[in-house]
């Protein structure tokens, strides 16, 4: 079987041309349109297999170079294509011919059976110290797992389930609805077996899961946060997500790092940003303080000049470790200058003598006003009106 001949295309055909060819061929040879004959089933299988390879750029490259034999030798070979799955991508899981193709051509409940459940993303807060040094954390993971007593079957030992009579084991029911001159077929999950395709007698249900096949389980796990980890990075816990019925395995959990807010420290790239309070005397006459670094060191910070408001100072190489470059960022200080709450007359006179004095005005007839403290908001008001963002309705041409 030559895949290009099956679809009636050539090697230079575009992805859209291959897709159109598949759509046309699959509609023509669908078993429900051709009396469910063996010939139509085989032809439909060949069409689905060909499209499964030629629509995948990786498989198509291998096939073009080495042929079908090379594709089968490859770990992602072309022999595992379900034509019904491909067909459902074009018709939303339905069958435009109204037949029982989903239940008869792949075995009971094949359409509803996925290999893995959905992955889950969970945020986990980590501190500056954990980012700086790395750490190990223990988490109590609560999730849905298959019942170990009945091995996820839902029945007692020695008992068995039965094929659902309403959906005949497909897990899907079909209803025909009249819309004007047309009759429309609609599919919905069977409400008797909940899409499982089977039913269990009350007396045969597993006493642990009650026939639900799934139970909630708590598990203590330990994770390792590497030194230099950043916000947005993650740890992948393989097959630790919730299972669901009709899946053979659980999906994965992605623990996404989020920096826990800190009042005095933050991170920008690989730099550690610290806001540290200092006295007015230290800002004017020189600074020497002990700083408890989050890397668990105690270091002395010194500066022998005037420190002005909004000034920034750095210590090279005392920031975060970068796992890719093997280098360290910097430690950046922003100082919050604390003014005294009050001064006595003696200190006021002393400061007036030490600090620069403003030149007095010669005009003695000026009016004098005493200032009062106020909490009035002096930020400018927002004068912009709210309008619909036109970018939200932008059309993307493909």
Image (spheres, rainbow, N blue to C red):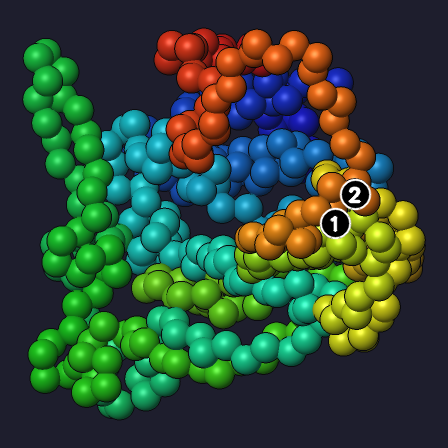
Q: Is residue 192 above or below residue 357?
A: below
x 76%, y 62%: residue: 228
Task: Give how far across and how far down residue 309 sits, in percent.
Answer: 72, 40
Report the side of 275 relative to 149 (left or right). Answer: right
Q: Is residue 324 visible?
A: no
Q: Mark 2 Cα within 10 Å, few/some/many (few <14, many 20+)?
A: few
Q: Secondary structure at mark 1?
A: helix
Viewer-proximal residue among 227 and 363: 363
How many numbered markers are drawn? Answer: 2
x 38%, y 10%: residue: 385
Report the side of 201 relative to 255 (left or right). Answer: left
- Residue 353 got which mark? 2
x 9%, y 79%: residue: 202
Q: Are marks 1 and 2 in contact (CB under 8 Å)?
A: yes
Q: Which residue is mark 1?
A: 350
Q: Is residue 114 above or below residue 379?
A: below
Task: Give how far across and how far down residue 297 sits, in percent.
Answer: 81, 75
Task: Give how far across and how far down residue 115 sits, in percent.
Answer: 47, 60
Q: Mark 1 Cα within 10 Å, few/some/many (few <14, many 20+)?
A: few
The C terminus - image quarter: top right
Q: Is residue 132 above or below residue 88?
A: below
Task: Give how far across and how far down residue 293 sits, in percent.
Answer: 76, 68
Q: Secondary structure at mark 2?
A: helix
Q: CA distance from mark 1 to mark 2?
A: 5 Å
Q: Report which quarter residue 308 is drawn in.
A: top right
Q: Is residue 126 visible?
A: yes
Viewer-proximal residue among 108 and 381: 381
Report the side of 58 relative to 286 (left or right). Answer: left
x 72%, y 60%: residue: 229
Viewer-proximal residue among 274 and 44: 274
């Amino acid at each position: 079987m030559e895949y290009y001949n099956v679809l009636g295309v050539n090697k230079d055909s575009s992805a859209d041309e291959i897709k159109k060819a598949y759509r046309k061929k699959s509609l023509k040879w669908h078993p429900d349109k051709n009396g469910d004959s063996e010939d139509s089933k085989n032809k439909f299988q060949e069409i689905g297999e060909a499209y499964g390879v030629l629509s995948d750029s990786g498989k198509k490259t291998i096939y073009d170079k080495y042929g079908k034999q090379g594709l089968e030798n490859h770990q992602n070979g072309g022999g595992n294509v379900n034509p019904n799955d491909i067909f459902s991508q074009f018709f939303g899981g339905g069958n435009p011919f109204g037949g029982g193709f989903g239940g008869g051509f792949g075995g009971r409940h094949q359409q509803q059976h996925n290999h893995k459940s959905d992955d889950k993303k969970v945020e986990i807060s980590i501190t500056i110290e954990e980012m700086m040094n790395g750490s190990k954390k223990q988490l109590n993971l609560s999730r849905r797992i298959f019942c170990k007593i009945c091995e996820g079957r839902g029945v007692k030992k020695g008992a068995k389930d039965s094929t659902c009579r309403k959906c005949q084991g497909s897990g899907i029911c079909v209803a025909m609805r009249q819309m004007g001159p047309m009759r429309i077929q609609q599919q919905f999950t069977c409400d008797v077996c909940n899409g499982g395709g089977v039913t269990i007698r009350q007396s045969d249900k597993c006493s642990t899961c009650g026939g639900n096949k799934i139970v909630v389980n708590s598990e203590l796990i330990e994770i390792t946060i590497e030194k230099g980890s950043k916000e947005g990075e993650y740890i992948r816990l393989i097959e630790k997500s919730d299972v669901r019925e009709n899946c053979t395995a659980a999906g994965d959990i992605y623990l996404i790092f989020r920096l826990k807010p800190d009042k005095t420290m933050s991170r920008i790239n690989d730099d550690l940003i610290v806001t540290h309070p200092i006295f007015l005397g230290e800002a004017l006459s020189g600074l020497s303080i002990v700083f408890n670094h989050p890397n668990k060191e105690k270091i002395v910070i010194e500066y022998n000049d005037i420190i002005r408001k909004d000034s920034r100072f750095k210590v090279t190489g005392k920031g975060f470790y970068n796992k890719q470059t093997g280098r360290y960022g910097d430690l950046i200080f922003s100082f919050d200058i604390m003014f005294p709450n009050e001064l006595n007359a003696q200190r006021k006179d002393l400061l007036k003598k030490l600090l620069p004095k403003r030149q007095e005005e010669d005009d003695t007839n000026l009016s004098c006003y005493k200032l009062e403290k106020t909490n009035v908001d002096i930020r400018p008001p927002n004068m912009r009106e709210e309008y619909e963002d036109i970018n939200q309705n932008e059309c993307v041409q493909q």
